[in-house]
Amino acid sequence: MSAYLGDVVVLARKDLLLELRARDTVPAMLLFVVSALVVFRFSLPAEASDLAAVGLLWIAVVFTALLGLTRAFAAEREQRLLDGLVLAPCDRSAIWLAKSASVLAFLVLAEAIALPAFALFFAPVGWETVAAFALADLGIAAVGTLLAAMAAASRARELLLPLLFLPLVIPIVVGGVGASVQADPGRYLAFLGLYDLVFAILAWASFEYVVTE
Amino acid sequence: MIVRARGLERRFGEKRALRSLDLDLGERDCLVVTGPNGSGKSTLLALLAGLLAPTRGELEVSAARGSIGFLAHEPLVYRELTALENLELYGRLYRVRERRERIGMLLERYGLWDARHERVSAYSRGMVQRLALCRALLHGPRLLLLDEPFSSLDAAGAEVLDAELAALAGERALVLATHEPERVRPLATLDLALA
């Protein structure tokens, strides 16, 4: 178990180091999410309710996550480095877990900018929205990383990833918007937690088959 | 036998990259694979490494995943990491004992010690190939698969590799796919010419 966690830490540290040096994912995500919120600010009618704006916030974050996921395996894809990692004797699910952790970190960074920006342009966000995003991030990172690995092996990866990812995050949007706007957010948060658990187990168990023939 | 193949075949769609190959490779054999471009040399090595599955036939490789060293066309190193960081990463994943000493020894031997803190993106093609060789050799593999190992190496680098292969021949199982068979012919116990 400690060897497994050691592999995860080593691989996640590598991903964070690569991003720190290349800086080609997080700045793009930050710019995108702020730009999207600015566009929404000017596209919503003045009399539109804050509830509609909350829905747009979730859309902005989902598409920001998609942007990050398209780059998640960029280094591995461009230099066929996934072969090098797959050949190593570590459990292949450690590759998924480490990559999910780095995707999660990038997403949290994007939201650290997006939520204050939303509060500035629209309305303050409550604890339930923050909790919903925290749970949603786990699900997005788990499912998105698996799908990004699948798409990375395909020639039509730019098309494939959104086609696979967006239908699978509909429950996250439903749960997240529900938790953000309903008077009783508890059951929506529980739904997001259940989604995370189910899809994290599925992604963890199936990653090996995605990266091998 | 460390490798046993019977009727091994691999297709990519309609194209047959490798056709009906029988192969027995012993623990201390050195197999030299030759053939023109597109004859299936790289495909054979990828099959032996476990990166591809056969389309038809049987393939048994008795070396565990962690005891195979594979030098592919791509160096399989991160361009934005330094040589030291790349080898540290693989050394940890391969659970290399006395990792630091082993990495230092390989970097020294392949003339990369002074450039160990430079990012691989700043390396010449020959230096990247040297680093890729260090990566493939790092964990002391039982089965070493080298695809065009002399590619991009200068005379000094090729001499180091000659000495390395001479030391490994008779100790480990080697599979060398090359367009320079005369260079490794003295080491060969088996020849395979793919058409």
Image (tube, coloured by chain):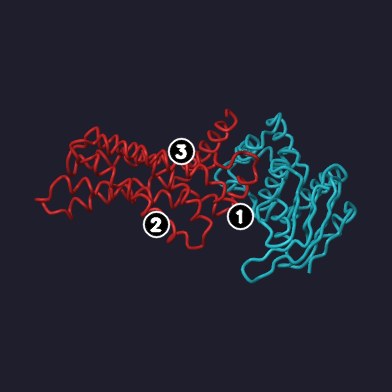
Residue contact at pointers 3 and 2, CB within 8 angstroms: no
Residue A130: quarter of image = top left
Nearer the N terminus, badge 3 or badge 2?
3
Estimate the x, y position of residue B142 in percent, counting from the top left: 78, 42
Nearer the N terminus, badge 3 or badge 1?
3
Estimate the x, y position of residue B120 in percent, counting from the top left: 60, 46
Give me the C-alpha separation between circle 2 and circle 1. Answer: 23 Å
Residue B90: quarter of image = top right
Q: Secondary structure at mark 1?
A: loop
Chain for numbered disc 2? A
Q: Which residue is mark 2?
A: A162
- The amino acid pointed to by label 3 is Ala
Q: Is residue B69 left or right of residue B184?
A: left
Give me the C-alpha separation between circle 3 and circle 1. Answer: 25 Å
Chain for numbered disc 3? A
Marks 2, 1: nearer the viewer: 1
- The amino acid pointed to by label 2 is Pro
Q: Which chain is red?
A: A
Q: Quadrant of the C terminus of chain B?
A: bottom right
Q: Name the one closer to the observer, B155 or A19.
A: A19
Give me the C-alpha separation between circle 3 and circle 2. Answer: 20 Å
Q: Which residue is mark 1?
A: A213
Q: Which residue is mark 3?
A: A101
Estimate the x, y position of residue A68 in percent, counting from the top left: 41, 48
Estimate the x, y position of residue B158 in percent, counting from the top left: 79, 51
Numbered badge on residue A3: none
- The amino acid pointed to by label 1 is Glu
Q: Which chain is cyan?
A: B
